[in-house]
Image (spheres, rainbow, N blue to C red):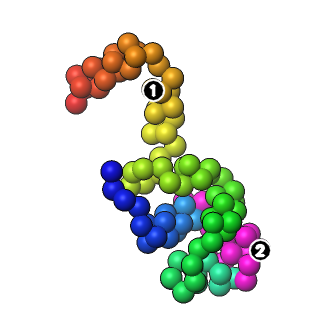
Amino acid sequence: MKEITYNDIIKRLGYFRTKANLSMREASLLLGFNPQFMSTIENGKIELKVKTLLDFCKIVDITPQDFFYLGEHYNKEDKNVLDLYNNLSQDGKQTIIDLMKKLK
């Protein structure tokens, strides 16, 4: 598993902001800060606070777990598949694994 760095978190911040169709200015204002706030975080001029990250997750409609979801790009469909898989019995999980191997 790849270790997540502070720079990875900042990249994810920009990824989710863009995915929510928010400019840096719009996100800053929704968070209750001056229009340049997100720019200063994404450009590394100030550090991101945990409270700001939690508030950010709310404005882009994701959970903190979604924010830290492993993978290059967040994908709700992948997360839904994993949730469904985790609710299966061991036999059901093995059936899915066997099917996926056949479909490769």
Report the residue at 69% width, 56% height from top. Answer: 58
Is residue 90 or residue 24 the one in the foreground? Answer: 90
Q: Amino acid at mark 2?
A: Gly
Task: Report the side of 100 relative to 5 (left or right).
Answer: left
Q: Is residue 68 magenta?
A: no
Label 2: which secondary element: loop
Residue 63 disc label: none
Q: Is residue 48 above or below residue 98?
A: below
Is residue 47 or residue 92 the one in the foreground? Answer: 47
- From the image, tell me which residue sits under label 1: 85
Residue 47 in the image: state x and y as whole percent.
Answer: 57, 78
- From the image, tell me which residue sits under label 2: 32
Residue 66 in the image: state x and y as whole percent.
Answer: 55, 49
Q: Amino acid at mark 1?
A: Tyr
Label 1: which secondary element: helix
Q: Are marks 2 and 1 in contact (CB under 8 Å)?
A: no
Q: Residue 11: tell me if it is visible.
A: no
Alpha carbon separation for disc pair 2 and 1: 39 Å
Q: Quadrant of the C terminus?
A: top left
